[in-house]
C-alpha cells in the first residue's frame, strides 16, 4: 500500500514538472508565435496576475479586505512618469525602486493606524486612501492634474511582455517562498485565522500585518511603473480609479483567496475574457454582466475559487474553519 502510494505521488510530481516545463516554454516564446495582438494580451495577463496576487496577499493571506490597492499602483505609475519627464531625465529602470520604496513608506504610515481596524472599517479606511490619492493627483501640478502626463517610450511590445512576465515571475516566487514555504507565511495565516491565539504564542501581530501590507504594496507599485511606460500616457482616472482595485478583488476571488496560484488563474481567465468581449461587443458592458454572474456562482458553489476544486485546497478550508471556531477566531 505504501509503495503504491509513493508511486502515485511520484507520477503526479513528474506530471506537474512536465506541465510546468511546457508552460514555461510556451510563456517564454509568446512573441515568436502569438502575434502582436496576443503578445499585448498576454502582457496584460502578466500584469493583472501580479496585481491580483498583491491583493491576495493582504486580502486572502492576511484576511484584511483592502479597497486601496490602486493607491500603490498609482504611486508607481506617477513616480515613473514624473521622473522620466525631460526636466528630470531618469532612466526607466531606476524609477521602479523609487516607486516601490514610496509605496512601502505609504503602506507603513497608513497601515500603522489602519490595521488596528477590522472588517468594514479597514475596507472603508483603505477606500478613503485611494480616493484621497485620486483627488490629490487631480489637484496638484506636478502630476499634470486631470490632463495627465506623457512618456516617450522607445521600447517594443516584446520588451514590455518580458518585463511584465519577469516581474510577475519574481513576485510569485517571492510570495511563494515567504507565504507558502517560510515562517512568515505561517505567522500571517495564524494572524488571519485567530489573531488572539497568534498573539498568545508570541507573534508580534502588528508587525506581521504591517509586513504583509508592505509586501502587498510593493508589487502594484512596480507594475504601475512598468504600465506607465508601456501605455505612454497616464492620468488620475487611468491609474487611480477604484475599478482597478475592483478587478484585483474579483480576479483573486474567482481564482481562490489565500492560494498562491489562484490569482494567476483568475487574472488569466478574466482578462482574456475581457479582451474578447471588448473585441466582440465593442465595449465592456457585457463583460461586467458576465463577471457579476461568475462572482455569484463562485460565492455560492466555489467559496475557495477555482483552485478549491483541488482536494488539497478543500482540506485547507476545513482546517481554517476549525481554527476559526477557537475563542477569538472570528473577526469583528
Image (cartoon, helix red, strand yellow):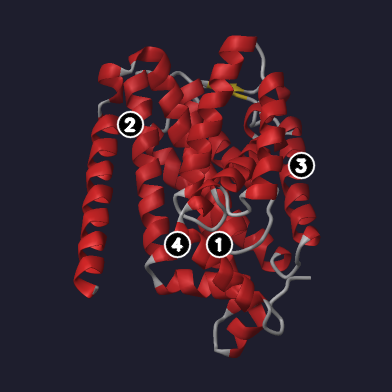
Of circles 2 and 4, which is in front?
Answer: 4
Point out the tag, 2 or 1, that comes first from the N-terminus.
Answer: 1
- For marks 3 and 4, give the CA distance: 39 Å
Marker disc for residue 61: 1
Of circles 3 and 4, which is in front?
Answer: 4
Point out the tag, 3 or 1, that comes first from the N-terminus.
Answer: 1
Tell me which residue sits at (71%, 41%) in the image.
296
- The answer to whether residue 48 is visible is no
Label 3 element class: helix
Kindly indicate the quadrant of the structure image that contains residue 237: top right
Quadrant including the C terminus: bottom right
Point out the tag, 2 or 4, that comes first from the N-terminus.
Answer: 2
- For marks 3 and 2, give the CA distance: 32 Å
Point out the tag, 3 or 4, that comes first from the N-terminus.
Answer: 3
Residue at numbered disc 3: 131
Of circles 2 and 1, which is in front?
Answer: 1
- For marks 3 and 1, give the CA distance: 25 Å
Label 4 element class: helix
Marker disc for residue 253: none
Of residue 220 and residue 175, the one placed in the foreground of this image is 175
Residue at numbered disc 2: 162
Label 1: how many Cα within 10 Å (few below 14, some 14–19, many 20+): many
In the rendered image, the vertical position of residue 214 relative to residue 91, given as above or below: below
Amino acid at each position: 500500500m505504501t509503495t503504491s502510494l509513493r508511486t502515485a505521488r511520484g507520477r503526479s510530481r513528474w506530471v506537474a514538472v512536465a506541465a510546468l516545463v511546457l508552460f514555461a516554454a510556451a510563456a517564454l516564446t509568446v512573441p515568436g508565435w502569438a502575434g502582436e495582438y496576443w503578445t499585448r494580451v498576454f502582457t496584460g495577463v502578466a500584469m493583472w496576475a501580479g496585481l491580483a496576487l498583491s491583493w491576495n496577499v493582504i486580502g486572502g493571506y492576511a484576511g484584511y479586505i483592502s479597497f486601496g490597492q490602486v493607491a500603490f499602483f498609482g504611486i508607481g505609475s506617477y513616480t515613473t512618469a514624473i521622473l522620466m519627464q525631460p526636466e528630470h531625465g531618469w532612466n526607466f529602470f531606476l524609477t521602479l525602486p523609487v516607486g516601490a520604496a514610496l509605496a512601502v513608506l505609504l503602506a507603513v504610515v497608513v497601515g500603522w493606524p489602519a490595521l488596528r481596524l477590522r472588517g468594514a472599517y479597514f475596507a472603508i479606511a483603505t477606500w478613503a486612501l485611494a480616493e484621497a490619492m485620486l483627488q490629490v493627483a487631480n489637484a496638484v501640478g506636478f502630476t499634470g492634474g486631470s490632463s495627465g502626463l506623457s512618456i516617450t517610450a522607445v521600447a517594443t511590445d516584446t520588451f514590455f511582455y518580458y518585463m511584465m512576465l519577469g516581474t510577475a515571475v519574481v513576485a510569485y516566487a517571492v510570495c511563494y517562498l515567504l507565504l507558502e514555504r517560510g515562517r512568515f507565511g505561517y505567522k500571517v495565516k495564524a494572524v488571519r485565522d485567530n489573531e488572539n491565539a497568534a498573539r498568545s504564542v508570541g507573534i508580534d501581530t502588528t508587525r506581521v500585518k504591517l509586513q504583509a501590507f508592505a509586501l502587498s504594496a510593493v508589487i502594484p507599485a512596480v507594475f504601475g511603473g512598468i504600465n506607465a511606460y508601456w501605455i505612454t500616457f497616464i492620468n488620475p482616472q487611468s491609474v487611480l480609479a477604484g475599478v482597478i482595485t475592483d478587478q484585483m478583488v474579483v480576479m483573486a476571488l474567482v481564482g481562490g483567496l489565500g492560494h498562491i496560484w489562484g490569482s494567476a488563474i483568475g487574472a488569466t481567465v478574466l482578462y482574456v475574457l475581457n479582451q474578447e468581449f471588448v473585441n466582440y461587443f465593442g465595449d465592456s458592458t457585457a463583460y461586467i454582466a458576465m463577471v457579476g454572474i461568475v462572482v455569484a456562482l463562485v460565492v455560492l458553489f466555489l467559496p475557495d475559487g477555482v483552485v478549491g476544486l483541488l482536494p488539497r485546497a478543500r482540506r485547507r478550508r476545513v482546517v481554517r474553519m476549525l481554527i476559526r471556531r477557537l475563542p477569538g477566531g472570528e473577526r469583528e
